[in-house]
Amino acid sequence: MHCFRAAADLYLTPILRDFSDTYPQVVLDVTLDDAIVNIVAEGYDVAIRLGEVIDKDLIAMKLGPDLRQTVVASPDYLARHGTPAHPRDLLTHRCIAWRWPGQKTPYKWEFMENGKWFEVAIDGPLISNMKDFGVQAAVDGVGIAFASQQLIAPHIAEGRLVALLETWSAPFPGYYLCYPAQRQMAPPLRALIDTIRAGLRERNGVETAAIGAAVPRGMRLHQR
């Protein structure tokens, strides 16, 4: 199995004990990273990844709500450098960049204005392949970061970070469990999917889409 790091905390860790106890004969081999891999070519049976980077020939099952990234900075940074009023103002700020695994250039921050997405190629003193590392750097006043609510919400609640430019921060497809189409699903894969779905129902009262549901058309499919 291939799984994005943040998705593992949300959808794998909570069900591991139940899955292991219920199916003791099954070995769950998990690779945790944010690389965009071809799961068929790399030999994975299943993956959990963001909806916008799912290969079009995979069957996908939505696991949770849409996500949203927000620009954040520490009060100390804003006192020293000022507050950007528009995403393009970030070009004159010290921004903390994140790079997709396997990519040479940093991710361009994405915003929405008048119903259309646009990108800002930020620059700054730090580039990392770990978003939580960049968020902590923002807490420490190194620069401005751009991350999901899952990572920044505790820091905002405690006053360590301030949310910025929220008008331009639009939701995008969240996490999906995806796997190749197959005439007959292997029992271990079926067991894992059923356990994840049961865990979501138990914790959140969430019923996932039926197995085999297609990824909604119209979502952004970026080349990272």
Image (spheres, rainbow, N blue to C red):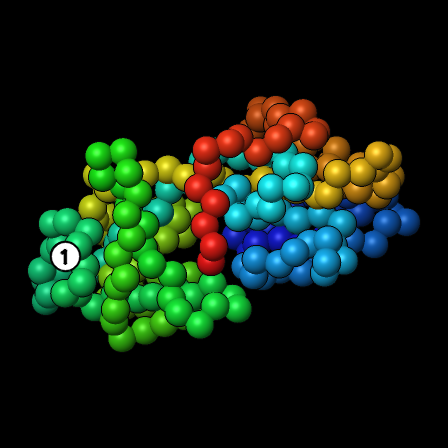
**Residue pointed to by mark 1:** 89
Secondary structure at badge 1 equals helix
What residue is rendered at 53% in x and 30% in y? 216
Identity of the residue drawn at 25% across and 69% down: 123
Please, is residue 135 above or below residue 180 in the view? below
**Total numbered labels:** 1
Pick the front one: 141 or 219? 219
Residue drawn at x 32%, y 73% as measured from the top left: 126
Q: Is residue 102 left or right of residue 76?
A: right
Going by the image, does 166 lie left or right of 97?
A: left
- What amino acid type is highlighted by mark number 1? Asp
Location of residue 57 (image quadrant):
top right
Residue furthest to the bottom in view is: 125
* Residue 14 appears anywhere in the view: no
Image coordinates for residue 172, horizontal then vertical, percent: 41, 39
Residue 190 x/y as whole percent: 80, 37
